[in-house]
Amino acid sequence: MLSVVIPVHNEEAALLPLYDRLTAVMERLGRPYEVIFVDDASTDRSFELLANLVETDARLRVVRLRRNFGQTAALSAGFDEARGGVIISMDGDLQHAPEDLPALLEKIDEGYDVASGWRKQRNDHLLLRKIPSRVANWLMARVSGLDLHDFGTTFKAYRAEILKDVNLYGELHRFIPALASFYGARIAEVPIQNPPRAGGASHYGLGRTFNVLFDILTIRFLLKYFTRPMHFFGRLGLAGVTLGGGILAFLLAKKILGYEIILAHGPLLFTGGLLLVAGLMMFTTGLLGEMMMRTYFESQGRRIYAVREVLAKGERKAP
């Protein structure tokens, strides 16, 4: 079964046209499906419209959040409710054309675990959206090691088992392919349309683009050092201890030779002591990180690996 997850926040103008077009596309596919709208505490008539639609279509479900938690939380709520073997996420403002959905599914049917949309021709403001988005996508590609052009779009298709290994926090929904790649997911990119909004105001602005930079640093750490934090903090600690220790050793030698240290090299003495203490703190942070990482995996019974399938004579078994 296919599950389509659509987060919604104040999209009343787009909901009925979206539902009609999406239903037409899904019925042409001829596969069992469900549509899950997640109302992220809309203040317009979005929930009222969705509640009316539920009464007419048994394949439709609506999840209403208690307050506005944001797009990542809304997607996570929809993923938790989804029952399909393939889950498609898309926006509720008609900037994702439902007619592109079969192209994403084709990649899943070809054996990919994630089919990610690519807004090849963007209909956005050049300075406020296009240029910042290109810079952010370039950085994300370098950090994650994924050759994707468009990390920001929500329009993606996933195998359900892939999402079980991905926990979403903050605004990390755009990094789901990168997080999934940590467990060896096979990812394909599919060009999609980028029509203008049907109505309402965009929830994205230039300010949110800067938040992406912090997310990139988070993803870099998670992808490279999540299971070995000491390798990250230990390097910083070693650098601090080496530099600080070297400076203090140099000043100690000068003191032994009779030079005045406090007056002549006060700032250098302070710098050496600060580097030494900071290095020791980094070592301590790394050790705490190692303990927390082990507690995380062992307490939840999580694995540090993911099995695609198991082969044995006469049988072929997926995990």
Image: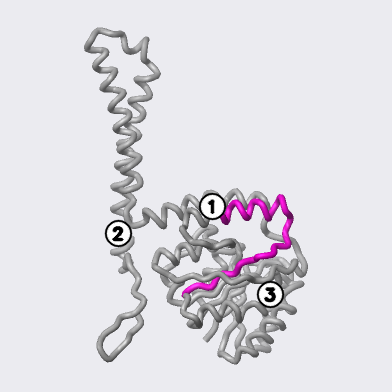
Estimate the x, y position of residue 266 in percent, counting from the top left.
Answer: 37, 16
- Nearer mark to the viewer, of 1 and 3: 1
Q: Is 16 above or below relative to 168?
A: below
- Nearer mark to the viewer, of 3 and 2: 3
Q: Is residue 229 left or right of residue 194?
A: left
For the residues marked 3 and 2, what is the alpha-carbon distance in whole angstroms?
43 Å
For the residues marked 2 and 1, what is the alpha-carbon distance in whole angstroms?
32 Å
Estimate the x, y position of residue 150 in percent, counting from the top left.
Answer: 59, 62
Name the residue beneath numbered marker 1. 139
Q: Are marks 3 and 2 in contact (CB under 8 Å)?
A: no
Instruction: Point out the stretch of residues depicted in magenta.
Output: 113-138
Residue 233 is at least partly visible in this image: yes
Q: Are marks 2 and 1 in contact (CB under 8 Å)?
A: no
If you read the primary sequence from the N terminus, does the residue marked by circle 2 or circle 1 appear first?
1
Picture residue at 28% right of the left edge, 64% below the top: 298
Q: Secondary structure at mark 1?
A: helix
Amino acid found under the numbered disc labelled 1 = Leu
Q: Is 264 above or below relative to 31?
A: above
- Nearer mark to the viewer, of 2 and 1: 1
